[in-house]
Amino acid sequence: MPHRQKLLQLLANYGLRHPAEVLTTTRMQAFINDNAGCFQRQLAVGHVTGSAWLLDTTGKAVLLTHHRKLDIWVQLGGHADGEADIAAVALREAEEESGLAELQLVCAEIFDIDIHPIPARGAEPAHWHYDCRFLVRATRSDAYVVSAESHDLAWVALAEVAGISSEESLLRMVAKTPQ
C-alpha cells in the first residue's frame, strides 16, 4: 500500500478541486486500493497510466498524437510499467513519444483524470486505463519527432482541438487549461 499512497493523496487533492468528478475520482481510488499491482500492465482488468497535456513554449497549443493502435488524436501518455510516480511516468512518456527532452511539470498535482476502455488487441484482452494526466510545458523547443507509437504528432491550438476531436476528455482538458 505505501507505493500507492502518493497517488491516492494526489487523487484526494484532485477530488477537492473537482467535486463534479467525484464518481470518476472514487472509482479510481477504489481500483488503486483494491489492486496492489495497479501500476503493472500485466494486471488484466486494467492499470494506472500517466499522460501529459503537453503545452508548447507559448502555452497556446497542445501536442497531440494520432495514436497508432487507437487511430484517434489523444494526449501523449502510456503505461506505468511498475512505476508508482505517475508524474514521472507522464514526463517519460511525453519525452519518448515526442522526442522533446526539456519538459517540465507546470504543477505537481494531477491536472485531469479519465477512466477509459481499451479494446482487445491480439492476445491482449479488453481492459481499462485509469489515466492520470499532468500539465506539462515544453521549455526550450517545440520541434518534435514522431515515434513508432504514432501515425503523426501535431501542435494544435487550444481553440482548435474541438475541430479535430470530439473526445470528451480532450475537451475537458482544454477547458481546464489556464489561458
Image (cartoon, rainbow, N blue to C red):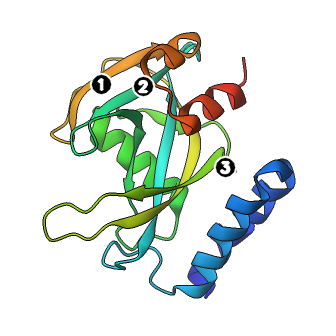
Q: Is label 1 or label 3 in front?
A: 1
99 and 21: which is toward the camera: 21
- Distance from label 2 to label 1 (Cα)? 7 Å
Where 63 sits versus 126, above or below? above
Return the residue at label 1.
153
Judge by depth and name the residue closer to the eye, 78 or 68: 68
Mark 2: give few (<14), some (14-19) or many (20+) Cα within 10 Å: many
* Residue at the (71%, 31%) spot, across then down: 176
- The residue carrying pointer 3 sits among few (fewer than 14), some (14 to 19) or many (20 or more) residues within 10 Å by Cα, namely few
First along the sequence among labels 1 and 3: 3
Does 164 sit above or below residue 31?
above
As helix, strand or loop, the secondary structure at mark 1 comes to: strand
Tell me where residue 72 appears, x and y as whole percent: 33, 34
* Residue assigned mark 2: 63
Q: Secondary structure at mark 2?
A: strand
Name the residue rendered at 13%, 64% in the picture.
122
**Category of crowding for the residue at label 1, using alpha-carbon neighbours closer than 10 angstroms: few (below 14), some (14–19), many (at least 20):** many
Residue that numbered label 3 is attached to:
108
Q: CA distance from mark 2 to mark 3?
A: 19 Å
Amino acid tagged 2: Leu
Q: Tell whether label 1 touches label 2 (CB within 8 Å).
A: yes
Looking at the rendered structure, the kind of residue marked 1 is Leu
